Amino acid sequence: MDAARGPVIVGVGQVNDRTDEPDLALDPVQLMAEALRRADHDAGGGVLADCDSLAVVSQIAWPRLNPVDGTLADMLGIAPKHREQTDKPNGDSPIRLLNEAANRIGAGEATVCAVVGGEALRTAARIAAAKPREDGSKPNALRDASHRVREGFAQRHGLVVPVDVYPLYENAGRAVRGETLAEGQAESGKLWSGMSEVAAECKHAWLRQKVAPDDVVTPSAGNRPIAFPYTKLQVANASVNQGAGYIVTSLAEARRRGIEEERLIHVGHGAAAHEDEDFLKRDSYAASPSLATSIEQCLAKNAIAPGDLNHVELYSCFPCVPKLARRVLGWPLERPITVFGGLTFGGGPIGNYMSHAVGCMVEKLRETGGKGLLFANGGYATHNHTILLSADPLDCSFPHDFDCQKIADARRGPIPPLAQDYAGPATLETWTIHYDREGEPRLATVVARTPDGVRTLAVVEANDTTSIAELTGATDPIGRPGQITRNGSDERGTWAFA
């Protein structure tokens, strides 16, 4: 491929809308439009007018809005031939769309590609709070989103949204690594405190405050427990109004427009792999073959080693994800794992976080030079996508195949069958406790294995204080035997330690 056809990022834009009045706040499409206007300004102006490919990360704050139906393009005064919106707001979407834009540029199918997303959940929550429900429950945009499955075996046992599921990985991973709870929490605290330091210095971050490691993991009035062992400061902060986008062209097009070479960030090859959409169909909750494959294959495709990286963005919806990712890279605990501030402090606009990370990585590489790796995760530890950016040209041909699914599938262990009506003896595989807004346990979810190795689910009710105490005690409960009982009138299994 002619090097001049190689894809480069020429402009990035981010916006934080902190307006307190819902009537004055920007909706998600308005956030997207403003982000792309800023990206165009960053590129020198006039680039967006020639956009022939517009890709949008779907949003959940305003379900009725469809940015690609003409609304967003009309706001911007553009008429792209290619328009798409992701089917779900998965966290890997911005990186997948970047890889697809790079392929489109390299294949000569597009000249100017724009990728953007925006969420206004902060405003949506305030509007919803003003309309109380008849049953007195509070609206929750995350749990109420249309793509959430509301009924099913997992949901009946308390596993509804990502914050319910990712702790299963945290607790299983800690046990396999032979760590105590204190050791696992110490790593989480160190990682998140480091991200808060990055956010404090990042003009684009939503929360620009440094937080000490102990304050990250210690429950308090302002840091209530969410799902064991995670507190509020260890989970993605979705209560934001944020938009971010970027513009990709070919190197030749950027030069034709007179954009300075030192402002061009070259796009390398990416790699993607996924787990089953059903999070109960996982070979293990202590690791992820698709996560490891995505990162390793990205390095291999770009012919670099972890030591060649100057910066990384390791997706940080919950601590278990960057813990796994940094071990694949061999990334030291002392080095920053973000250029934006992480989903707690930078902001967690559902599927569009990585667009902000792209923006910050571009700015960082313009400032320092070198290479930056972006690792994205989405769904329920389901979707993984990694890509390389560089201040200097890369020896990469486009279009290229970034699908590494066969490699991930080959390294995955057997997935245990699932029993939905099992009662009898079982062994605890992993678990979590879900807390109410007052910080009190409302339910515990246990993933268990039968004597035949079949996987099943059970719960511990909040009033079973003995079992709750054993789950949170000094001795790790994973591997301990127990008994599952099922009441004919209750579709949920109930767990008790043997």
Image: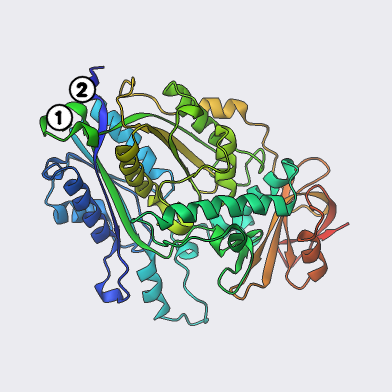
Residue 54 vertical placement versus 241 (above, below)? above
Q: Are marks 2 and 1 in contact (CB under 8 Å)?
A: yes
Question: In the image, is 261 to the left or to the right of 395?
Answer: left
The N terminus - image quarter: top left
Percent across and percent down for residue 213 are 59, 57
Mark number for residue 4?
Answer: 2
Distance of label 2 from label 1 (alpha carbons) = 9 Å
Residue neighbourhood size for the residue with mark 2, other residues' Cα within 10 Å, grouped as few (<14), some (14–19), many (≥20)? some
Question: As displayed, is residue 439 above or below residue 486?
Answer: below
Q: Nearer the viewer, residue 52 or 263?
A: 263
Q: Is residue 87 above or below residue 462?
A: above
Q: Which residue is mark 1?
A: 255
Amino acid type of disc 2? Ala
Examine the image and state in which quarter residue 206 appears: bottom left
Above or below — where is 492 with respect to 244? below
Query: The disc labelled 1 sits on which kind of residue?
Result: Arg
Please provide percent x and percent y for residue 407: 54, 25
How was the colour assigned to the protein in this rendering?
rainbow
Q: How many marks?
A: 2
Residue found at the very far top of the displayed protein: 1
| Horizontal and vertical percent position of residue 147 | 45, 56
